[in-house]
Image: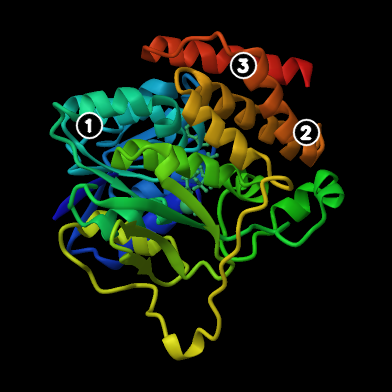
Amino acid sequence: MKKIAILGATGSVGRQALDIIEKFPDRFKVTALTAHRSSDELLETAKRLGACYVGLTGCNGDLEFEKKVPKGMKAGFGIQGLVESCTAGNPDIVLIAVVGIAGLPPLIECLDRGIDVALANKESLVCGGHIVKQKQKTSKSELFPVDSELCAIYQCLNGVDTTGLRRIILTASGGPFFDWDKESIQKATVEQALCHPNWRMGKKITVDCATYMNKGLEIIEARWLFDVPPDKIDVVVHRQSIIHSMIEYNDGAVIAQLGPTDMRQPIQYAFGHPERLNSVVGHLDFTQLKTLTFDVPDTDKFPCLKHAQNAIRAGGAMPIIMNAANEAAVELFLEKKIAFGDIEKSVAFAMNKFSDLKANTLIEIYTTDKEVKDYVYHNI
Ligand code: NDP
Ligand code: MG
């Protein structure tokens, strides 16, 4: 019986992870669950699955909530609640499926304590990849990427080192604005940006897909997860999202991972590892796949991809600055306070303005993140 903590249990990835756990009741058991504000759903799920700990991260205390927590279950709040969830009930693996840089403290906690991680959250690696890499040298933790493209590369590499690797090829769906003209994209509405052609996901990542920042974040994830230089990580637009990503060796051999377009596949891979559990999402029928298309990403229409490539090449604090500006601008866009085109402009502006900030330590990362976000909230 594997014991699993789910951080971000009320979100898109979190709920799909709970579905996997409920489909394999004799293999998986929940320890802790967290949510940011969805306290009713959090408690209801925690009771149903017998969790021993609930973390409500959007506040630093809530007496009403505490009164509803049953005997034998503990409650925690804020960042502390998130970090305590990594150890409460001694989980074998922690799924980090919260959104934004909030994923970094629990990731560090797991690495420090030697607990395995199923990592859906990408912003933690984008901001803290250099520290994570350093900690992995001595940590007993295994890191299983849950982001479908990164999980695909993990499976393609299959534990073999990257000697002889020519490049990693990340596939991108192209998002909702693939065939829109540049001017129309600038004025896209929230409803249009949230209309992803292939995946149903949380709002932030869905907007990131529309700007292509999501693929930029994945380049940075891949750089840290697989220790591959950024110029060996390419992106190809593959509208069908059937090939989840590929690797190419120097001799021209390409290894790809294909599968149903369903996040439960990479989640069950991470939970079941090293075993391959029976699919809960069905299987590909190749006779029904009439066309698989491949296009060059258009960085003129979607400059966020270029910004991310520049950020990881520049190194230092630049990926944190880029990520912070993006997180803040996406929030403002979802609140209908800025236009879709302003997201990219905010990112470009912040990368230009804040080039001298530092990010060598965790404290410096959080300070840089806050400074850039505050600027975007008040000046864009
Ligand atoms: P959702 O917005 O659907 O869910 C986010 C979850 O985290 C919710 O449980 C939410 O609680 C909680 N949360 C929100 N803000 C915070 C915060 N500041 N601190 C702690 N917890 C918070 O997101 P997704 O499930 O779509 O994505 C989660 C992560 O996984 C992201 O980093 C995303 O990029 C990555 N990812 C997602 C994929 C997907 O298919 N959805 C695919 C690949 C990667 P509440 O409900 O109370 O707000
Ligand atoms: Mg992805």
- Say which quadrant the C terminus sits in: top right
In terms of depth relative to the viewer, which is nearer, 236 or 322? 236
Give the distance between the C-alpha atoms of the residues marked 3 and 2, in whole angstroms.
15 Å
Q: Residue at x 25, y 55 (%)?
A: 157
Given residues 305 and 189, the one toward you in this image is: 305
- Residue bearing the label numbered 2: 342
* Furthest residue toward bottom: 287
Q: Is residue 350 left or right of residue 69?
A: right
Classify mark 3: helix, strand or loop. Answer: helix
Residue type for callout 2:
Asp
Q: Nearer the viewer, residue 115 or 148?
A: 148
Q: What amino acid type should be assigned to the residue bearing mark 3?
A: Val
The local secondary structure at tag 2 comes to helix
Q: Is residue 61 left or right of residue 333?
A: left
Q: Is residue 376 left or right of residue 268?
A: right
| Label 1 packing within 10 angstroms: few (<14), some (14-19), many (20+) | many
- Residue 238's spot in the image, x, y percent? 55, 65
Query: What residue is shown at x 52% (from left), y 21% (from top)?
Result: 318
Q: Earlier in the sequence, mark 3 or mark 2?
A: 2
Q: How far apart are labels 1 and 3 at the CA level? A: 31 Å
Q: Where is residue 371? Give x, y as percent.
A: 59, 11
- Rate crowding at label 2 as few (under 14), some (14 to 19) or many (20 or more) other CA atoms within 10 Å: some
Quadrant into which the N terminus falls: bottom left
Mark 3 vs ligand 1: CB below 8 Å = no
Q: Which residue is mark 1?
A: 87
Q: Report which residue position mark 3 lands on.
A: 372
